[in-house]
Structures are given as C-alpha cells and as structure tokens.
Image: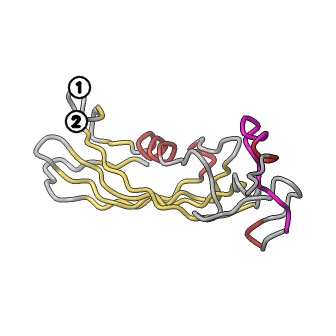
Amino acid sequence: MIIRLNAGNKEDLPFSFAMPCDKLDISSKGTIYLGNAIIEGKLIFLGGDYAAEGKVTVGKRFLCDRCLKEVEKKVHIHFSEKFSREESDDSTLFTGDEIDLTEVVRDNILAAEPISHLCKEDCKGLCKICGKDLNEGECGCDRHIVDPRFSILQDYRIDD
C-alpha cells in the first residue's frame, strides 16, 4: 500500500487499495479476517509533512464470547496518521517519495480489536445449568445462586 508522491504536488491525493488480509498478518486465535481489506482515503499535504486519513473495511469471523455462535461481520475502522521526513514523536518517519501505509493499516486494525467479541450487544449467552442459548428463549432452569457466605440465611424464618 504505497503512495507515490509527486514533486511539487500540494493537493490532496486520494488513495484506494485492496489487500488480502492474510498478507497483513492480523488473524489471531479468536478472529479470522476474511478476503480483502479495503483501504480508502486521502493523503493531505501539510507543508512538508503529510497526513493520511481514511477508513479500512474488513470482514471477520469469530465465535461470540457469550453464546459461542460463529459470527461474520464487516467492520469499518477509521485512521489518521501524520508522516514526516524528520523524526518526531507525533508522526511516522518516511524517506524518499513514497509513503507506505501497510503498518499503519495493520496497527489500526489490531488496535480496534475488541476485548470481547459479541454477536450483538445484548447477547444473553448460554444457560450455566443446561447450556441452552438464551437468545432463543428461556430454558426454565433456576439460575439463582446464593452467595455461600449468606446461605445460612435461606433457612432463617421469622415467626409472628
């Protein structure tokens, strides 16, 4: 994903790339990225530096952490990165007349990876007694668990 700079060009340069996800080395134990990552955006001239702004669209497959269903989703990840020919804390160094977006795209995809994967925000998960998927309806199991420190109070009766 290399953007070639034209000498003297001070206008925004639009870019669009498609890169196979397996070439980005982003799949992990719990997530498999599918097909191509689509990268679209523009390179903005900042006087001597450049800023790349855009979005990555990628498909992924994972197991829901609550109900264990296999899920395929498309995700959109926005990114913004500054590039400079001089070393700086707030920009990525580049030399010559090419800016390579590969590492920026890879890092942004990995940074957007959630701590837990859910099929939907309100996934109810599995019953801890019988294992039924609670998204499909209740199972009838008594899932009320009393804290063992208070279990003696279950037998306590107040007589009138």
Would you identify the image quadrant in which residue 25 lies? top right
Whole-percent x and y of residue 66?
71, 55
Whole-percent x and y of residue 11?
16, 59
- Please report the bounds of the magenta region as a residue range: 140-152
Residue at image point 77% right, 49% down: 145
Q: Are marks 1 and 2 in contact (CB under 8 Å)?
A: yes
Q: Which residue is mark 1?
A: 87
Q: Residue furthest front?
A: 160
Residue at image point 29% right, 58% down: 42
* Distance (Cα) linking label 1 and label 2: 7 Å
Residue at image point 64% right, 45% down: 27
Residue at image point 79% right, 56% down: 143
10 or 154: nearer the viewer: 154
Which secondary structure lies at badge 2? strand
Q: What's under tag 2, amino acid-wise?
A: Ser
Badge 1 crowding class, 10 Å Cα cut-off, few under 14, some 14 to 19, many 20 or more, is: few
28 part of magenta stretch: no
User: Is 63 on the left or on the right of 1, as rendered?
Assistant: right
Which secondary structure lies at badge 1? loop
Q: What's under tag 1, amino acid-wise?
A: Glu
Q: Is residue 100 above or below residue 160?
A: above
Would you identify the image quadrant in which residue 160 lies? bottom right
User: Is 122 on the left or on the right of 54, as rendered?
Assistant: right
Whole-percent x and y of residue 8?
13, 49
